Amino acid sequence: MNAERRRAARASLWSRLNEFRPYVILLALLLPLACRKQTEQSPRPRAGRFTPQQLQAKFVWDLGAGAVDVAGYPDAQRKNYEVFKAKCSLCHTLARPINAPFVGREDWKRYVHRMHAKGEAANMALSEKEEKAIVNFLVYDAQERKVKRAAQFEEDTTLLEELFDEVQKEQGRLALEEGKKEIRSFTYTGDRP
């Protein structure tokens, strides 16, 4: 009699478990997917993913190449490049103008003149000759790299924009983390309401 009860209880248990079988199978299939998705959306990137220079980027263009191979450029443009490197690197990365989307002379004149005005405020003014050399180099370089090889420049710019989005997220995360450190280090002394 005991054996029959046990068999009946087991049969009853198996019939109840069979009712949940599709749910168990579905859960077994979805659990790895749910875990994978959570890992992909992890808000904290790998340590050391970005360089210190990348984390200091203020503009998309700061993330691109910081130099131009001018070996094939005319002598005058190589000299202009030296002026550009010497003067422009005093205030910002060379990557910023090198990777900026400007190509026309008027755009570059406006850009360089604006930087010239900022330089005057910091006692780093450009002479007219230096300003002209810089504009001439930037226009020539833009024609060579951004107009003649427009598809490559567009592709590079798209990659920089994607990288900049990631860098901005990391900058925000670091700022929040830094803010938390500041809050944690605050010692309440009871003298403030």
Image (cartoon, rainbow, N blue to C red):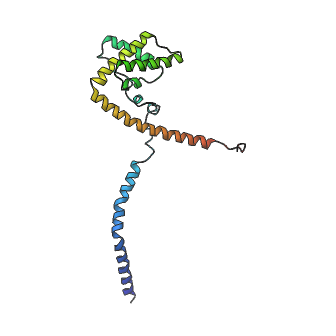
| Percent x, y of residue 132 | 40, 12
Q: 148 or 6, which lies in front?
A: 148
| Percent x, y of residue 82 | 39, 14
Above-or-below relation of 160 to 190: above
Above-or-below relation of 32 to 47: below
Above-or-below relation of 100 to 176: above
Q: Quadrant of residue 184?
A: top right
Q: 124 or 120, which lies in front?
A: 120
Residue farthest toward the front in the current orientation of the protein: 106
> Which quadrant holds the N terminus?
bottom left
| Percent x, y of residue 121 | 53, 18
> Which quadrant holds the C terminus?
top right
| Percent x, y of residue 12 | 37, 80
Q: 177 or 60, which lies in front?
A: 60
Residue farthest toward the bottom in the current orientation of the protein: 1
Q: Quadrant of residue 64?
A: top left
Residue farthest toward the right in the current orientation of the protein: 191
Q: Is residue 15 left or right of residue 172?
A: left
Point 30% across, 15% down: residue: 73
Point 34% across, 31% down: residue: 157
- Count of residue discs: 0
Point 40% across, 87% down: residue: 2
Residue 49 in view in this figure = no
